[in-house]
Amino acid sequence: MKKIYCLFLFIFLCGCAGFREGKISSIKSFPQTTDKASLGISLDFIVNFNGNRITNENAKNKIQSKIVERFNKTGLFSNVVIDSYGEDYTLNIKYEDLGDTNLFLAALTGATLYIFPSYAKDTNVITANLINNKTKRSEEIVLNDSVTTWQEILLLPITPFKHPLVEAVSMQNDLIDNLALQTYEKIQSSRN
């Protein structure tokens, strides 16, 4: 029990804060529309950690569900489904989660009880190809943003306000929302 208490204390007393690069901003509201197209989505989800590709079907399924949920929540589309090519449009998404860290510095940070700082960067890149299933015309959408996590004891006071997991989830949600909006805008411009 004492070991668990010490581990719990160590985890919460280590200063760790996440900072977004901020290339993508939050969308407060989406346009109201009655002209809605149906959308089929296919997803290629890639996780790379320090150049090593990691296959994780569970993570892919979670991202896929989140994309469908957030796209439906916007109210911009009549129907959003996975792996269907009978819809008005198809959105082929390549979602890359690129993690980069210096493992030596991270170990040094831990060995010095977080006095010596280290960082890790998580970059998310979305490359989507929107295809009009009637005309077969396609358009590309590219979005990216990143979160840099710094680890150091001096960051302890701001950890509750800039927790790396909260920042990463926020970045992911903003990327998906911006993808939905840009998809809608490209559909509308192709109809005019």
Image (tube, grey):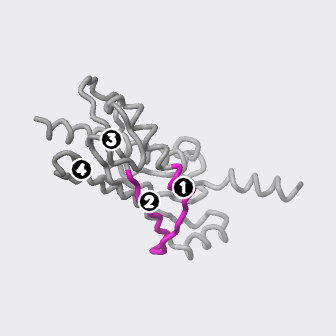
Horizontally, residue 192 falls left or right of residue 18, namely left
Q: Residue at x 50, y 55 (%)?
A: 60
Q: CA distance from mark 3 to mark 1?
A: 22 Å
Q: Amino acid at mark 2?
A: Phe
The amino acid type found where label 1 is placed reads Ala
Inspect this view and state whether residue 86 appears: yes
Q: Going from the N terminus, do you reach mark 3 or mark 1 first?
A: 3
Residue beneath disc 1: 59
**Horizontally, is 114 left or right of 98 in the view?**
right
Disc 1 or disc 4, which is closer to the eye?
A: 4
Q: CA distance from mark 2 to mark 4?
A: 19 Å
Q: Which residue is disc 3 drawn over? A: 39
> Is 61 in the magenta?
yes
In the picture of the structure, the residue carrying the numbered disc 2 is 45
**How many other residues sit within 10 Å of disc 2, few (<14), some (14-19) or many (≥20)?**
some
Marks 1 and 2, Cα distance to the nearest angstrom? Answer: 8 Å
Nearer to the camera, 67 or 168: 67
Question: Pointer 1 and pointer 2: residues touching (CB < 8 Å)?
Answer: yes
Q: Is residue 171 visible?
A: no
Q: Which residue carries the number 4 mark?
A: 131
The vertical placement of 44 against 40, above or below, is below
Q: Secondary structure at mark 1?
A: helix
The secondary structure type at the circle numbered 4 is: strand
Which residues are drawn in magenta?
42-62
N-term-proximal mark, 4 vs 3: 3
Q: Earlier in the sequence, mark 3 or mark 2?
A: 3
What is the quadrant of residue 114 in the picture?
Answer: bottom right
The disc label shown at residue 30, or none: none
